[in-house]
Image (cartoon, rainbow, N blue to C red):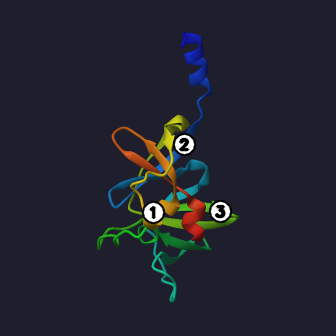
Amino acid sequence: MSTRTAVKSAATAVATRMLTFELAGHLYGLEVEQVQEVLRAQKVTRVPLHSDAIAGLINLRGEVVTAIDLRARLSMPARPEGQDAVNIVVRLHGESISLLVDSIADVVELDDRSFEPVPDTLDGEVRDLIRGAYKTEGRLLLALDVNRAVTG
Protein backbone atom coordinates (compact mmCIF):
# COMPACT_ATOMS: atom_id res chain seq x y z
CA MET A 1 0.00 0.00 0.00
CA SER A 2 1.42 3.35 -0.95
CA THR A 3 1.74 6.23 1.50
CA ARG A 4 -0.90 8.12 -0.46
CA THR A 5 -3.38 5.19 -0.14
CA ALA A 6 -2.65 4.83 3.60
CA VAL A 7 -3.28 8.54 4.17
CA LYS A 8 -6.50 8.36 2.15
CA SER A 9 -7.68 5.30 4.13
CA ALA A 10 -6.94 7.02 7.44
CA ALA A 11 -8.76 10.15 6.28
CA THR A 12 -11.87 8.18 5.31
CA ALA A 13 -12.01 6.19 8.56
CA VAL A 14 -15.16 7.00 10.50
CA ALA A 15 -14.96 7.52 14.24
CA THR A 16 -17.64 7.21 16.89
CA ARG A 17 -17.54 9.25 20.10
CA MET A 18 -18.77 7.29 23.08
CA LEU A 19 -19.42 8.08 26.72
CA THR A 20 -18.01 5.11 28.60
CA PHE A 21 -19.21 3.84 31.95
CA GLU A 22 -18.69 0.94 34.32
CA LEU A 23 -21.14 -1.69 35.50
CA ALA A 24 -19.92 -4.45 37.82
CA GLY A 25 -16.34 -3.97 36.64
CA HIS A 26 -17.17 -4.13 32.92
CA LEU A 27 -16.76 -1.27 30.45
CA TYR A 28 -19.77 -0.15 28.41
CA GLY A 29 -20.41 2.79 26.14
CA LEU A 30 -23.13 4.71 24.38
CA GLU A 31 -22.90 7.28 21.64
CA VAL A 32 -22.37 10.82 22.91
CA GLU A 33 -25.16 12.11 20.65
CA GLN A 34 -27.67 10.10 22.70
CA VAL A 35 -26.62 11.68 26.01
CA GLN A 36 -28.54 14.66 27.35
CA GLU A 37 -26.56 15.00 30.59
CA VAL A 38 -24.80 13.14 33.38
CA LEU A 39 -25.88 13.62 37.01
CA ARG A 40 -24.59 12.45 40.35
CA ALA A 41 -26.89 10.33 42.53
CA GLN A 42 -30.48 11.54 42.57
CA LYS A 43 -33.34 10.67 44.91
CA VAL A 44 -35.32 7.90 43.25
CA THR A 45 -38.99 7.43 44.09
CA ARG A 46 -39.89 3.75 43.80
CA VAL A 47 -42.81 2.75 41.59
CA PRO A 48 -44.82 -0.22 42.85
CA LEU A 49 -45.54 -3.26 40.66
CA HIS A 50 -42.69 -2.65 38.20
CA SER A 51 -39.79 -4.90 37.30
CA ASP A 52 -36.50 -4.51 39.18
CA ALA A 53 -35.05 -2.78 36.12
CA ILE A 54 -37.33 0.21 36.72
CA ALA A 55 -35.60 1.78 39.69
CA GLY A 56 -38.28 4.46 39.95
CA LEU A 57 -38.72 8.11 39.04
CA ILE A 58 -36.47 11.13 39.50
CA ASN A 59 -37.30 14.80 39.39
CA LEU A 60 -35.14 16.50 36.78
CA ARG A 61 -35.81 20.23 37.15
CA GLY A 62 -39.56 19.64 37.29
CA GLU A 63 -39.64 16.89 34.67
CA VAL A 64 -40.52 13.40 35.92
CA VAL A 65 -37.97 10.98 34.46
CA THR A 66 -38.02 7.18 34.57
CA ALA A 67 -34.81 5.73 36.03
CA ILE A 68 -33.68 2.36 34.68
CA ASP A 69 -31.11 0.39 36.68
CA LEU A 70 -28.82 -1.07 34.03
CA ARG A 71 -27.46 -3.64 36.50
CA ALA A 72 -30.94 -5.12 36.87
CA ARG A 73 -31.69 -4.69 33.16
CA LEU A 74 -28.54 -6.65 32.28
CA SER A 75 -29.26 -9.34 34.92
CA MET A 76 -26.26 -8.36 37.06
CA PRO A 77 -26.04 -8.48 40.85
CA ALA A 78 -27.43 -5.46 42.70
CA ARG A 79 -25.16 -2.48 43.33
CA PRO A 80 -23.31 -2.88 46.66
CA GLU A 81 -25.01 -1.25 49.64
CA GLY A 82 -23.88 2.34 50.05
CA GLN A 83 -22.63 2.72 46.46
CA ASP A 84 -24.56 5.51 44.77
CA ALA A 85 -25.48 5.23 41.12
CA VAL A 86 -24.61 7.84 38.50
CA ASN A 87 -27.41 8.95 36.15
CA ILE A 88 -26.85 9.12 32.42
CA VAL A 89 -29.86 10.97 31.05
CA VAL A 90 -30.65 10.10 27.45
CA ARG A 91 -33.35 11.54 25.24
CA LEU A 92 -35.33 9.09 23.11
CA HIS A 93 -38.44 9.86 21.11
CA GLY A 94 -38.77 13.25 22.86
CA GLU A 95 -38.62 11.74 26.35
CA SER A 96 -35.82 11.89 28.93
CA ILE A 97 -34.82 8.61 30.56
CA SER A 98 -32.17 8.08 33.22
CA LEU A 99 -29.84 5.08 33.04
CA LEU A 100 -28.32 4.19 36.42
CA VAL A 101 -24.68 3.06 36.16
CA ASP A 102 -21.87 2.48 38.67
CA SER A 103 -19.49 5.19 37.41
CA ILE A 104 -18.61 7.30 34.41
CA ALA A 105 -15.27 6.63 32.73
CA ASP A 106 -14.35 8.86 29.75
CA VAL A 107 -15.56 10.17 26.45
CA VAL A 108 -13.54 8.32 23.83
CA GLU A 109 -13.28 8.47 20.06
CA LEU A 110 -13.22 5.00 18.53
CA ASP A 111 -12.31 3.96 15.01
CA ASP A 112 -15.35 2.24 13.53
CA ARG A 113 -13.01 -0.27 11.87
CA SER A 114 -12.37 -1.70 15.36
CA PHE A 115 -16.11 -2.40 15.85
CA GLU A 116 -17.00 -6.08 16.01
CA PRO A 117 -20.28 -8.01 16.30
CA VAL A 118 -21.53 -9.08 19.72
CA PRO A 119 -18.97 -11.55 21.13
CA ASP A 120 -20.09 -15.19 21.23
CA THR A 121 -19.12 -15.31 24.90
CA LEU A 122 -22.04 -13.02 25.82
CA ASP A 123 -25.36 -14.67 26.44
CA GLY A 124 -28.75 -14.01 27.93
CA GLU A 125 -30.14 -10.51 28.44
CA VAL A 126 -26.76 -8.83 27.88
CA ARG A 127 -26.43 -10.24 24.36
CA ASP A 128 -29.79 -8.73 23.32
CA LEU A 129 -28.89 -5.27 24.61
CA ILE A 130 -25.41 -4.89 23.09
CA ARG A 131 -24.84 -3.63 19.53
CA GLY A 132 -21.28 -4.93 19.41
CA ALA A 133 -17.84 -4.34 20.89
CA TYR A 134 -14.75 -2.20 20.41
CA LYS A 135 -11.27 -3.34 21.37
CA THR A 136 -9.68 -0.56 23.39
CA GLU A 137 -6.38 -0.36 25.22
CA GLY A 138 -6.44 -3.59 27.16
CA ARG A 139 -10.23 -3.74 27.57
CA LEU A 140 -13.29 -4.69 25.62
CA LEU A 141 -15.88 -1.89 25.40
CA LEU A 142 -19.43 -3.16 24.93
CA ALA A 143 -21.60 -0.74 22.94
CA LEU A 144 -25.03 -0.51 24.56
CA ASP A 145 -28.11 -0.43 22.33
CA VAL A 146 -29.96 2.31 24.21
CA ASN A 147 -33.27 1.77 22.43
CA ARG A 148 -33.39 -1.90 23.39
CA ALA A 149 -32.17 -1.21 26.93
CA VAL A 150 -34.96 1.29 27.47
CA THR A 151 -37.86 -0.39 25.70
CA GLY A 152 -37.23 -4.02 26.62
Position of 119 relative to 92 (above/below): above
Q: Amino acid at mark 3?
A: Leu
| Image quadrant where residue 4 sits | top right
Residue 48, how many percent across, how many down? 50, 89
In the shown orientation, is residue 34 left or right of residue 48? right
Dot 2 falls on a residue whose secondary structure is: strand
Q: Nearer the viewer, residue 113 or 53?
A: 113
Q: Residue at x 57, y 60 (%)?
A: 146
Classify 10 Å Cα crowding around label 2: few (below 14), some (14-19), many (20 and above).
some
Query: Label 2 sits on what residue type?
Result: Arg
- Seen in the picture, residue 17 relative to 52 is either above or below; the reply is above
The mark found on residue 104 in the picture is none
Q: Residue pushed farthest left?
A: 81
- Reading the image, the residue beneath label 1 is 126
Who is closer to the viewer here, 36 or 77?
A: 77
Q: Which residue is mark 3?
A: 92
The residue tagged 2 is: 17
Distance from Cα at disc 3 to Cα at disc 1: 20 Å
Q: State the SS at label 1.
A: helix
Q: Position of residue 45 (x, y in %)?
A: 49, 81
- Mark 3 and mark 1 lie on one chain; the one further toward the N terminus is 3
The quarter in which the C terminus is drawn is bottom right
Residue 5 in which image quadrant:
top right
In terms of image quadrants, where is residue 37?
bottom right
| Residue displayed at 33% across by 40% down | 138
Q: Nearer the viewer, mark 3 or mark 1?
A: 1
Q: Nearer the viewer, residue 121 or 43?
A: 121
Q: Is residue 100 left or right of residue 2?
A: left
